[in-house]
Amino acid sequence: MRLSANSPCPCGREAKLKQCCGRVHQGRPATPPELVRARYTAFVLGKVRFIIDTTHPEASHAREDRGAWRNELQDYCRRTEFHGLQIHEHEVDEERGEAFVRFTVELSIDGRPAGFTERSRFRREGKRWLYLEGELHEPGADA
């Protein structure tokens, strides 16, 4: 999907794309909740390079073959319709360089509802936070 930089940001904030997740896509450092929003928006827009670049290299789903990984993500983005993101809570442990964000995504894949709630774990690498892993919860379940 292509959106104008002046379109409302897909993450759900009341801001234009260029003033919200677009800044993070352009390299502005992000807090873990901002990174969740920017990654969600990257999935909506099919910005798979951003998704790959903000995934920690030690993540279990990270792939050495970036071309194959890129193709899988592009296919997922094409088949998925994103309906919304809600951030519930987050916690940051600066000493350990670790953070957690719990959020819910409403989406459908190939026309079938496939929303989920996740508690994501992030690890700081230098000045950047990177997505490491997520624990999925049933839709509507308290985490």
Image (cartoon, rainbow, N blue to C red):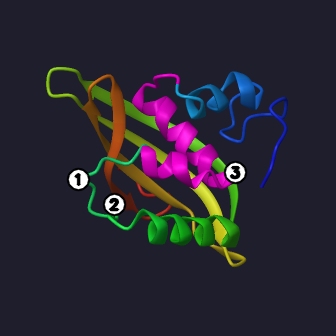
Q: Residue at x 68, y 57 (%)?
A: 82
Residue contact at pointers 1 and 3, CB within 8 angstroms: no
How would you classify the magenta stretch by its main secondary structure? helix
Q: Quadrant of residue 1?
A: bottom right
In this picture, is 131 found above or below 8?
A: below
Q: Report the amino acid beneath label 2.
A: Ala
Residue shown at the point (68%, 30%) measured from the top left = 13
Magenta-colored stretch includes residue 73: no
**Count of numbered tags:** 3
The residue at which mark 3 appears reads as 45
- Residue appearing at x 42%, y 63% in the figure: 66
x and y percentages locating residue 25 in the rendered image: 59, 34
Q: CA distance from mark 1 to mark 3?
A: 25 Å
As drawn, 82 above or below 90: below
Q: Position of residue 136 (x, y in %)?
A: 37, 60
Q: Which residues are magenta?
A: 28-53
- Horizontal relation, residue 114 to residue 110: left or right: left
Q: Mark 1 or mark 3: name the one nearer the start of the chain.
A: 3
Q: As drawn, is 30 to the left or to the right of 100?
A: right
Residue behind mark 2:
62
Q: Residues within 10 Å of mark 1 (few under 14, many from 20)?
A: few
Residue at numbered disc 1: 58
Question: What amino acid is at disc 1?
Answer: Glu
- Mark 1 touching mark 2, by CB under 8 A? yes
Residue 75: give x, y in percent of width and height: 61, 72
Q: Amino acid at mark 3?
A: Leu
Q: Of callouts 2 and 3, which one flags the residue occurring earlier in the amino acid sequence? A: 3
What number is the disc on residue 120? none
| In front of the other: 35 or 2 | 2
Q: Whole-Å distance between the Cαs marked 1 and 2?
A: 7 Å
Relative to 115, residue 88 above or below? above
Residue 63: x and y in percent read 34, 65
